[in-house]
């Protein structure tokens, strides 16, 4: 089984959930889905594809395919629709098309998504790029961008600890970050006005700063814990700590956590930068 649709393309917003299943018995798969909690059959589209709706209002589509057609089905179910339209237009006059029968007639191995792209004269295009925004032409020219991978991440600049509403201590989070090969993290616990999350008072923040300094001394420059805080922007635009405290921090995250119903002008004035 694989995630497909906007979920696989890792879009910022996901309208529904889409899955592709390799099976010779689609009806059995659909029957199992219906038994999953409060999921009920919504609309059966074809013998190999059906949609379901959750009691909560969300929806899910399940498509089924054979092993020999997995690569092509994975491409088609992943989309986007615009990517597939542009892909079809690019290969319309080639030796193969996106139709499974045409691919098999051309001797193309459709069980692998990479093989399908190769048969269409293109390098593999990462799902994240498949939005019909020029990626096919870029692929033809060998100009596809390299996407950021987990190994490229050097640090994390927003981390809450047990001092406010996090689940691990600074030391535990630093150890986990080091195990991932990070070079730095920033500790950004909530500021004092956010009582619900046990926001740090000035005294507790200063204690945390000293603790971080001691931990950094042990690291001897091989790994750095940045001193920071997620500081509330108060209703009148002031920050939740005085300047003398803020100057002790390496960086600051400024956030609004209250009074969301203020008028447009007042809310805008609230977040505008101030001299000094």
Image (tube, grey):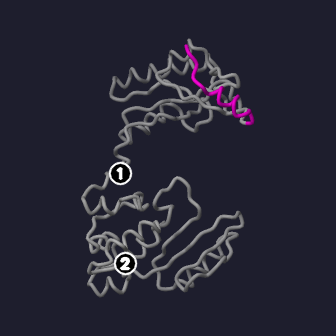
Give the side of residue 79 with respect to residue 154, left or right: right
Residue ID for mark 1: 147
Q: Position of residue 204 (x, y in %)?
A: 60, 20
Looking at the rendered image, the disc whose residue lies closer to the viewer, 2 or 1, is: 2
Q: What residue span does the magenta drawing correspond to?
A: 261-276
Label 1 element class: loop
- Which residue is rendered at x = 45% and y = 66% of the image? 82
- Which residue is rendered at x = 29% and y = 88% of the image? 105
Note whether 154 is above or below 31 in the view shown. Answer: above
Placement of the C terminus among the 4 image quadrants: top right
Q: Position of residue 67 (x, y in %)?
A: 39, 80
Residue ID for mark 2: 98
Q: Position of residue 116 (x, y in %)?
A: 32, 74
- Which residue is rendered at x = 74% and y = 33% of the image? 262
Q: Of the two numbered discs 2 and 1 on the same chain, state the one appearing first in sequence.
A: 2
Give the side of residue 2 with respect to residue 71, left or right: right
Which labelled disc corresponds to residue 251?
Answer: none
Mark 1: give few (<14), some (14-19) or many (20+) Cα within 10 Å: few
| Residue sitting nearer the eye, 209 or 2 | 2
- Please identify the quarter of the rendering in which residue 256 is found: top right
Residue 42 belongs to magenta span:
no
Label 2 element class: loop
Q: Position of residue 206 (x, y in %)?
A: 56, 17
Mark 2: give few (<14), some (14-19) or many (20+) Cα within 10 Å: many
């Amino acid at each position: 089984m694989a995630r497909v649709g906007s979920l696989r393309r890792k879009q910022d917003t996901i309208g529904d959930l889409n899955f592709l299943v390799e099976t010779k018995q689609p009806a059995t798969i659909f029957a199992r889905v219906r038994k999953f909690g409060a999921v009920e059959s919504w609309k059966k589209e074809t013998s190999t594809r059906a949609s379901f709706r959750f009691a909560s209002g969300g929806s899910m589509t399940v498509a089924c395919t054979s092993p020999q057609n997995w690569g092509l089905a994975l491409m088609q179910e992943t989309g986007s629709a615009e990517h597939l339209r542009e892909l079809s237009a690019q290969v319309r006059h080639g030796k193969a098309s996106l139709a499974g029968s045409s691919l098999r007639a051309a001797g193309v191995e459709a069980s692998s998504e990479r093989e399908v792209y190769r048969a269409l004269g293109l390098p593999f295009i990462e799902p994240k790029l498949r939005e019909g925004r020029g990626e096919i032409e870029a692929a033809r020219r060998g100009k596809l961008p390299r996407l950021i991978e987990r190994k490229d991440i050097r640090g994390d600049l927003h981390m809450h600890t047990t001092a406010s509403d996090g689940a691990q201590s600074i030391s535990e989070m630093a150890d986990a970050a080091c195990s991932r090969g990070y070079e730095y993290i920033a500790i950004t616990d909530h500021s004092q006005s956010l009582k619900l999350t046990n926001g740090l008072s000035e005294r507790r923040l200063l204690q945390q700063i000293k603790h971080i300094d001691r931990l950094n001394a042990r690291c001897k420059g091989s790994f750095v814990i940045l001193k920071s805080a997620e500081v509330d922007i108060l209703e009148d635009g002031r920050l939740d700590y005085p300047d003398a405290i803020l100057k002790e921090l390496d960086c600051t995250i400024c956030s609004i956590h209250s009074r969301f119903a203020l008028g447009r002008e007042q809310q805008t004035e609230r977040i505008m930068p101030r001299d000094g």
